[in-house]
Image (cartoon, rainbow, N blue to C red):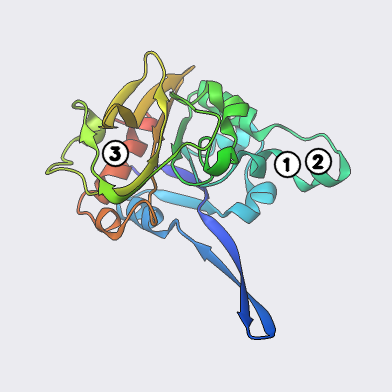
Amino acid sequence: MGLKILLAGESWSSIGFHLKGYSIYTTGGYEEGGKPLIDALEKEGHSVTYIPNHLVPSQFPNTVEGLAAYDVVILSDVGADTFLLHPETLTKSIRRPNTLKVMGDYVAQGGGLLMVGGFMSFSGFGGNACYHNTALADVLPVKMLGYDDRIECPEGINPDSAGKHVVLDGVDGGWPHFLGYQRLIAKAGAEVLLKVGDDPFLTLGTHGNGRVAAFASDCSPHWGPPEFVGWEHYPRFWSQLAGWLAARN
């Protein structure tokens, strides 16, 4: 039976400035990076509800009851402020639920939570993802640095297995390369399944009655290159990780 999965993040808008002699003009664009992960999970029979970054304030559930409609919540490249600085709070000083605390309560009551790496995950680019200062710092199975945690690896790095686990069943033959990841510290009692040197790359843990995981790199470019996204085990890996988070395996 497939899982109900909520994915938030993996979208961005861009502005370009073009200077040609004495003339300048601007261009804008919008892109989403979650399609490989969504397609992989749906291929494995799961149902994915996707909320891009700009719709998080209006569409992401801010009650435990709302989140309980999902077996697993995935946060990927969406900064903490996107949840904390709702327009009503930022511009009108209106009190609202702390959605990150709500997520912690959801997990404590049996939900599954995964954070996937990216410039706006964990501490993030310049420390601006800022999860180290939030309620999720006590929920995730890793400690965050509190400053720019990126390890850029343009030469490519390959994570190594640190032990057998149902999440990695059938994921054979070595992992593809990645172009970067985030330096994290596994908490005491957490289980590290993949490593890069001494750094945890995939870490599992528990919080209350629920399960949590931290994947230190990206599910899509740029850190997750075509060799990873097109890897034969890509759908199986994410499906088995979601199944473990939902206590289905």
State the residue lying farthest toward the left: 173
Q: Earlier in the sequence, mark 2 or mark 3?
A: 2
User: Can you tell which mark lies on residue 240?
Assistant: 3
228 or 49: nearer the viewer? 228
Residue 104: where, in percent of width, then height?
A: 57, 26
Q: Position of residue 63 (x, y in %)?
A: 66, 33
Could you tell me how far apart the alpha carbons at marks 2 and 3 are, in whole angstroms? 38 Å
Q: Mark 3 belongs to which amino acid?
A: Gln
Disc 3 is placed on an element classified as: helix
Question: Which residue is at the far right?
Answer: 92
Residue that mark 1 sits on = 85
Q: Residues within 10 Å of mark 2 (few under 14, many from 20)?
A: few
Question: Which image quadrant is residue 15 in?
Answer: bottom right
The residue indicated by pointer 2 is: 89
Residue 71 seen in the figure: no
Q: In terms of depth relative to the viewer, which is nearer, 9 or 69?
A: 9
**Residue 17 shown left or right of residue 121 in the figure:** right
Kind of residue sitting beneath label 2: Thr
Q: Nearer the viewer, residue 19 or 115?
A: 19
Disc 1 or 3, which lies upstream in sequence?
Answer: 1
Tell me the mark number nearer the camera, choosing from 2 and 3: 2
Q: Quadrant of the N terminus?
A: top left
Position of residue 198 in the picture relative to residue 5 (left or right)? left
- What is the residue that sits farthest to the front in this orientation? 21
Q: Is residue 11 above or below residue 22?
A: above
Q: Residue at x 49, y 17 (%)?
A: 208
Under circle 2, the secondary element is helix
Within-10-Å neighbours for mark 1: few <14, some 14–19, many 20+: some
Residue 31 image label: none
State the separation of the CA atoms marked 1 and 3: 33 Å
